[in-house]
Image (spheres, grey):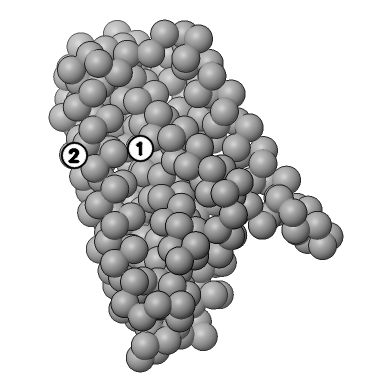
Amino acid sequence: MRTANPTLGVFNKPQTWDDARGISDRSKVMTLGGTIFASTVLIGITATVATIAWSMLQDGDAVSSAALPTLIGSAIGGLVLALIIVFKPKAAPFLSPVYAAVQGVFVGAISLVVARMLDARMDGVGLTTVFQAITLTFGIFAAMLIGYASGILKFGQVVKNCIMAATGGIMIFYMAAILLSFVGVTGMSGMLSFNNGSPISIGFSLFVVVIASLNLVLDFEFIEKGVQAKAPKYLEWYGAFALLVTLVWLYIEILRLLSKLRGRH
């Protein structure tokens, strides 16, 4: 099975795992326990750094002037690191913790900006919305993991293809919206605005949340297949990196959806 998720593309070609051929030592191959450990470390780093970034970028009840440059810089830095890891999976054990820290800065910055934006409309709802987004993100993660482990969420190839096609379409939409906004065409980028409470915009965000959630199931399956195929040890961190990418995407989209819903009141 192939994937449209670029972070998991390395699992498409197990024959390229030259360093895993003939390995019988379990300490040198990918294990589920090792992937769980790596995932816990990366999520912990992201959460810790996000909390620190939130605290440092506050200016009383407002947002520090450094928040926007920090947000943009961490977004670009995260993208660069992600591309390096995708093209050099063997670097995952070293670069994925750095990526998690940069993503922590991004998550903390965007969470603070959105929270203060919401507080400007109705005092006190910003922090509540952020906590709701965090709770929903990990709630969905737990539900998808339980569903997959129990065998309830086992997709056929047609469903997998639909999820992958939708994921690719969303990514193309993101890129097109950003590029068109540079030349003054804001129709598509308006759909991504945290302030857009129109029914179409809310419906789009809900659709993206569903697709991001379903991508977690594909992540679990690819990790399981890597473990079964005795992939090289470094892919534990690569699999954890891929999970973190999906989790951050899911969190941002849930935060966007909740913000849009708040904007209707």
Instruction: Give the total of numbered labels.
Output: 2
Q: Position of residue 236 (x, y in %)?
A: 29, 31
Mark 2 residue crowding within 10 angstroms, few (<14) / some (14–19) / many (20+):
some
Task: Write down the residue under mark 1.
Answer: 243
Q: Amino acid at mark 2?
A: Phe
Q: CA distance from mark 1 to mark 2?
A: 12 Å
Of the numbered discs 1 and 2, the one sitting upstream in the chain is: 2
Quadrant into which the C terminus falls: bottom left
Compared to residue 74, the image places residue 43 above or below, namely above
**Who's the residue at 37% across and 88% down the image?**
61
Q: Position of residue 218 (x, y in %)?
A: 39, 24
Q: Position of residue 14 (x, y in %)?
A: 43, 14
Q: Nearer the viewer, residue 164 or 17?
A: 164
Q: Nearer the viewer, residue 47 or 202?
A: 202
**Who's the residue at 46% across and 77% down the image?**
121
Task: Write down the residue under mark 2.
Answer: 37
